[in-house]
Every structure is written in structure tokens, then in C-alpha cells.
Image (cartoon, grey):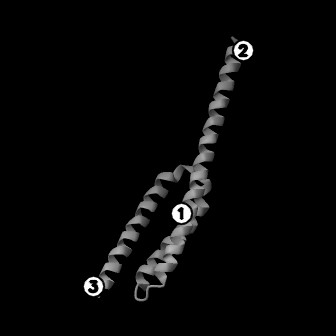
Amino acid sequence: MSVWSTGAGWTRGTSLAGSLLGHTSLAGSLLVHTSLAGSLLEHTSLAGSLLGHTSLAGSLLGHTSLAGSLLGHTSLVGSLLGHTSLAGSLLGHTSLAGSLLGHTSLG
């Protein structure tokens, strides 16, 4: 019985280790999202080169500072859903930027 209970404790330890491996791969995907956020920073600098979109650029700069605070939150694994919805809102701003480009070509 004690061997079984020790084995069960080892199994719990293994599943905890497996869960830590899961968190590690989530952390890896956060690093990928960080590099995606880096490419968004490149896109914001491209957006910044568009004259006349200063208010949009200002709001994108606000999102980049949010992205900076997200980098601080990479150690917190629990807020992945929040990061995903923020990423969704960044995509929304990208399509807003696209529609603004359409308005500038309408001029």
C-alpha cells in the first residue's frame, strides 16, 4: 500500500512536471507573440511615417506602451486570454489603419 501511495505521489509529481512543461511551451508561445509584437512596432513606425495620422499614431503609441507592459506580464501565465483579446484589438486597429488609408486615397 505504501509503495502504491508513493507511486501515486510520484504520478502527481510527474503531472505537475508535465503542467510545468505546458507552462514552458506557453511561455515559448509568448516569446513568439513578443516577436510578433516587435513586428507590430515596425508597423507602427511605418504608420508613423504617414503624415496626418498623428492621432492614430498617438493611439498606436499608447498600444505600444501597453505592449511594453505586456512584456512585463509575461511572467504571469494566467492572463493569456486578456493578451489574446488585446491582440484582437490590435488587429482591429490594424484594420482601422487600413480603412484610414482608404480614406486618404479618397482624399
Residue at numbered disc 2: 3
Left or right: 12 in relation to 99: right
Tell me the CA gap for discs 3 and 1. Answer: 31 Å
Q: Quadrant of the N terminus?
A: top right
- Nearer to the camera, 76 or 98: 98
Q: Secondary structure at mark 3?
A: helix
Q: Earlier in the sequence, mark 2 or mark 3?
A: 2
Q: Quadrant of residue 98?
A: bottom left
Residue at numbered disc 3: 106
Q: Residue 36: give its label.
A: 1
How far across and down, in percent of the image, does residue 73 sit?
58, 59
Q: Quadrant of the C terminus?
A: bottom left
* Rendered residue at 49%/76% (across/down): 44
- Nearer to the camera, 60 or 38: 38
* Rendered residue at 41%/65% (across/down): 91
Return the residue found at the far left.
106
Left or right: 7 in relation to 84: right
Tell me the CA gap for discs 1 and 2. Answer: 49 Å
Question: The disc labelled 1 sits on which kind of residue?
Answer: Leu
Mark 1 Cα shell of 10 Å, populated few (<14), some (14-19), many (≥20): few
Tell me the CA gap for discs 2 and 3. Answer: 77 Å
Question: The disc labelled 2 sits on which kind of residue?
Answer: Val
23 above or below 58?
A: above
Question: The disc labelled 3 sits on which kind of residue?
Answer: Leu
Q: Secondary structure at mark 2?
A: helix
* Rendered residue at 63%/41% (across/down): 21
- Nearer to the camera, 85 or 29: 29
